[in-house]
Amino acid sequence: MNTSKQVNVMIGLMFVTLIGVFLYFIWDDIRAEDATEKQIVENAERGGNLFSLNCRACHGMNGLGTIENTLLPGLPLNVDLNRPMMPDPDDPRRNVPDLGELMNRQNIIRDSIRCGRVGTLMPAWAEDQGGPLNDFQIQQLVALITGAMPGLDVPDNLNAVSEKGWESAVEEADHTDFLEGKQLAKAAGLTSTTFVLTETAELIADSLLRIDDEVVKIVTVGADSDEITVERAAFGSDAAEHEEGAQIFNGPIEPPTGPLTGEGQKYGPCGQRGVSASEPVGEPIPIQGEVAMELDDNFFQLDGQRSPILEVSVGQEVTIDLVNNGQAIHNMHIAGVDDTYDVDFCEVGGDEPCSEPALMAAGDEGTITFTFDEPGTLNFRCDFHPVLMTGQIVVVE
Ligand code: HEC
Ligand SMILES: [Cu+2]
């Protein structure tokens, strides 16, 4: 070989090595990105398991809270709002995570989980606030809800990551509620109140069962038959047809009704001001006919007056148009004429005047109409923030 050939071979070899090094770096980059994404998905899935064990009673199986079932007190968490995306500035046809808004949501969510929310049923979960969860578990819940793990690179598709986490929450619920050996031995129509099961052992009257998306309440368990009688569409669910072989699960965990976080304390978790009941304040504001009132986090407001005292005349019908300008859900529930609340959550058409709808999500509008036949003073409140969010109606001759 002459020198020039040797040089050519050398240059060739160097070239191959350079390309090799270059390819290695690209591959390593992709591998690292995949590894990070995998790590976030795993954490979101752990978050899903934690959610199923700790949070589902109030926020629902799928994390949709009040959207999933109006009997649930928890806010919807599995929503786009918590996984903010925006059009890519370089290519508006695709969406990328909105980093600023994402960080904002992550902070709100982490703080809500750590500290709970005073005046509501949301308890504090952080160990340093007396709760059962450590910081890492709370980050895993944040990863479940927002699709990104604080401290790690943000994945391209927040929804895809979060979805994996929510799937795992449902799997965990199915796994813990699984009633082995209990299936429908015969299909059940929409109205049938007798279910024939492959096995009824261990079932007890009054407990809830879940079958497909319906919840039923057991009325009687046949002593030596394989039949149970049930109340259909229990726990705010809808009746559905069920096929032979459908699996039976334990029913949902019923949410607690109290105590509220920080109730009766000077300071709640994380130094939040405890709940000293908000007293209705100010001069009575005379109202008649139709008026507008705002619901906000967490107060009623009429003409700029928070926790207002409204004055109405005996025998006159009044309609209040309500709008929820807050983030949380609210409603308006007026105590009965004895000025006590006989039910925790009011119902439209029930004995105590209730806003229609009885549950107003952020941005919702509603109305409440009432007439009082006796002079007196009646309190009203939001059932979701019963200590903080109050007002008063004075009925005058
Ligand atoms: C006892 C019922 C209950 C349980 C259990 C519960 N929550 Fe909540 N949670 C609530 C309520 C009620 C609210 C709404 C508070 C409000 O209206 O301000 C809430 C609010 C939240 C919020 C704030 C949402 C937002 O958009 O502002 C987050 C996040 C949250 N919960 C996460 C969790 C997680 C995670 C768990 C389980 C570790 C959990 N919650 C368990 C009742 C509950
Ligand atoms: Cu409220």
Image (spheres, grey):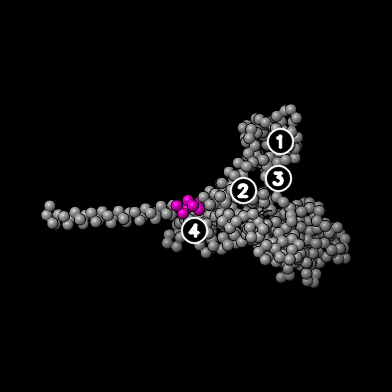
In primary-sequence order, the first of circles 1 and 4 is 4
Q: At 39% from the left edge and 55% from the top edge, which residue is drawn? A: 29
Q: Which residues are magenta?
A: 35-41
Mark 4 CB in 8 Å range of ligand 1? Answer: no
Tell me if I can see residue 96 in this picture.
no
- Reading the chain from its start, which is encountered first: label 3 or label 1? 1
**Label 3 crowding class (10 Å Cα cut-off): few <14, some 14-19, many 20+?**
some
Q: Residue 355: where, in percent of width, then height?
A: 74, 57
Q: Residue furthest bottom?
A: 283
Check if mark 4's residue and mark 3's residue have beta carbons within 8 Å.
no
Spatial separation of the CA atoms under disc 2 and disc 4: 24 Å
**Residue position for label 2:** 52
Q: Secondary structure at mark 4?
A: loop
Residue position marked by numbered label 1 in the rendering = 203
Q: Residue at x 58, y 62 (%)?
A: 107
Between discs 2 and 4, the one toward the N terminus: 2
Residue in view at x 51 percent, y 51 percent: 41
Tell me, yes or no, whether the highlighted magenta stretch contains residue 40: yes
- Gap between marks 2 and 1 measured at Cα: 23 Å
Closer-to-camera residue (132/334): 132
Q: Are marks 1 and 4 in contact (CB under 8 Å)?
A: no
Return the residue nearer the eye: 316 or 1.
Answer: 1
The image quadrant of residue 25 is bottom left
Alpha-carbon span between mark 3 and mark 2: 18 Å
Q: Amino acid at mark 4?
A: Leu
What is the C-alpha distance between the residues marked 4 and 3?
40 Å
The residue indicated by pointer 4 is: 152
Residue that lies at the very extreme toward the top in this rendered image: 224
Classify mark 3: helix, strand or loop.
loop
Q: Quadrant of residue 281?
A: bottom right
User: Which dot, 3 or 2, sits closer to the camera?
Assistant: 2
